[in-house]
Amino acid sequence: MEQRKHWWNGKWGRLARRDVFLRVDADQWHVEQRAGGAEGVSRFYEHSSVEEAEETVRALLDGPDSWRELSPRPPVDPPRV
């Protein structure tokens, strides 16, 4: 599964932090809505098209929070010998 995008509401702490992830696996798109940081609670949405997944993301980001898009981490290359 490849992570395409990640949004964060800019708040720290287990009670305030919210994240939204957009991922793809073959032709299946996955949206994760997470509350509470890395150890928080997640809800998952599956879609058959990127358009449907992006519509879900837009709905999840709607509201008073100041969402920030975070860049996905680039893949780590193995060390050269």
Image: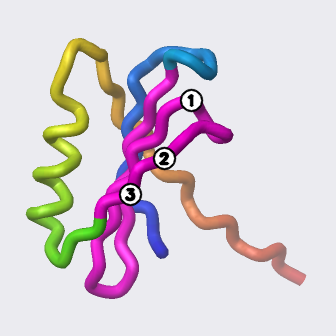
Please tell me which residue is depicted at 44% across the width and 45% down the height of the picture. 71
Q: Where's residue 60, x and y in %? A: 23, 37
Q: Residue at x 42, y 31 (%)?
A: 8
**Residue that label 1 marks:** 36
Please tell me how crowded label 3 is: few (under 14), some (14-19), or many (20+) other residues with Cα within 10 Å.
few
**Residue 43: percent from left, percent from top:** 41, 50
Residue at mark 3 to residue at mark 1: CA–CA distance:
15 Å
Magenta region includes residue 30: yes
Question: Is disc 2 in contact with disc 3, using a CB cutoff of under 8 Å?
Answer: yes
Q: Which mark is residue 44?
A: 3
Mark 2 or mark 1: whose residue is earlier in sequence: 1
Q: Amino acid at mark 1?
A: Gly
Q: Secondary structure at mark 2?
A: strand
Q: Position of residue 19 (x, y in %)?
A: 44, 36
Q: Kindly report the distance in space between the C-alpha atoms of the residues bearing marks 2 and 3.
A: 7 Å
Q: Which residues are magenta?
A: 17-45
Q: Which residue is mark 2?
A: 42
